[in-house]
Image (tube, helix red, strand yellow):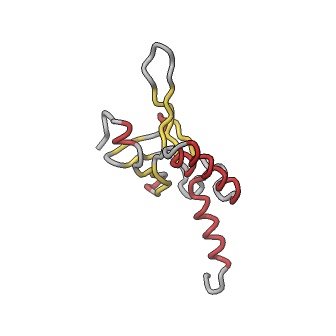
């Protein structure tokens, strides 16, 4: 079922973001708007990532999470920005044509998989 009309905060934010084949990438953490004088705001993109999510709690939290991301370096780049035109919404999911496993938001999972693969008896 396709959605004809969205209310951004209710219908977009925090919804699941699914890549090719319905594989989860994360959740929609932010919305990028373009504002031009004399025109209505336009939705340009959605954003996904820990720093974007932390931004909701204020600049101090955003800077702190950004420092953690840079310090531990597992989530570089820490932000995934997807053009609005590439998003397709249905009910409570956002579908995009992205390889979920290769997405930057899954960097910690890839790192953990490599660590676990080295453990004795993991194979």
Q: Residue at x 34, y 36 (%)?
A: 6
Residue in the picture at 62% in, 76% down? 116
x and y percentages locating residue 38 in the rendered image: 46, 13
Left or right of 58 in this view: 1: left
Q: Position of residue 107 (x, y in %)?
A: 61, 59
Which quadrant of the structure image shows residue 88?
top left
> Which residue is the extreme one toward the bottom?
121
**Quadrant into which the N terminus falls:** top left
**As drawn, is 7 to the left or to the right of 30?**
left
- Marks counted in the figure total 0
Residue 120 found in image quarter: bottom right
Q: Quadrant of the C terminus?
A: bottom right
* Name of the residue lying farthest toward the top: 38
**Which residue in the rendered view is the most extreme toward the left?**
1
From the viewer's side, name the closer residue of 37 and 102: 37
Q: Residue at x 55, y 50 (%)?
A: 49
Q: Is residue 26 left or right of residue 93?
A: right
| Position above or below: 46 against 93 | above
Placement of 50 over or under 31, stated as above or below: below
Where is residue 72 shown, x and y percent of the image? Answer: 69, 60
């Amino acid at each position: 079922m396709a959605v004809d009309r969205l209310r951004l905060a209710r219908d977009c934010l925090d919804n699941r973001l699914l890549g090719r084949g319905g594989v989860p990438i994360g959740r929609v953490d932010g919305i990028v708007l373009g504002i031009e004088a004399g025109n209505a705001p336009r939705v340009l993109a959605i954003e996904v990532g820990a720093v974007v999510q932390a931004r909701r709690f204020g600049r101090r939290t955003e800077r702190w999470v950004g420092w953690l991301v840079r310090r531990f370096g597992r989530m570089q780049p820490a932000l995934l920005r997807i053009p609005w035109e590439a998003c397709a919404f249905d009910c409570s999911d956002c579908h995009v044509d992205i390889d979920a496993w290769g997405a930057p938001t899954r960097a910690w999972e890839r790192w953990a998989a490599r660590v676990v693969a080295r453990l004795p008896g993991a194979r």
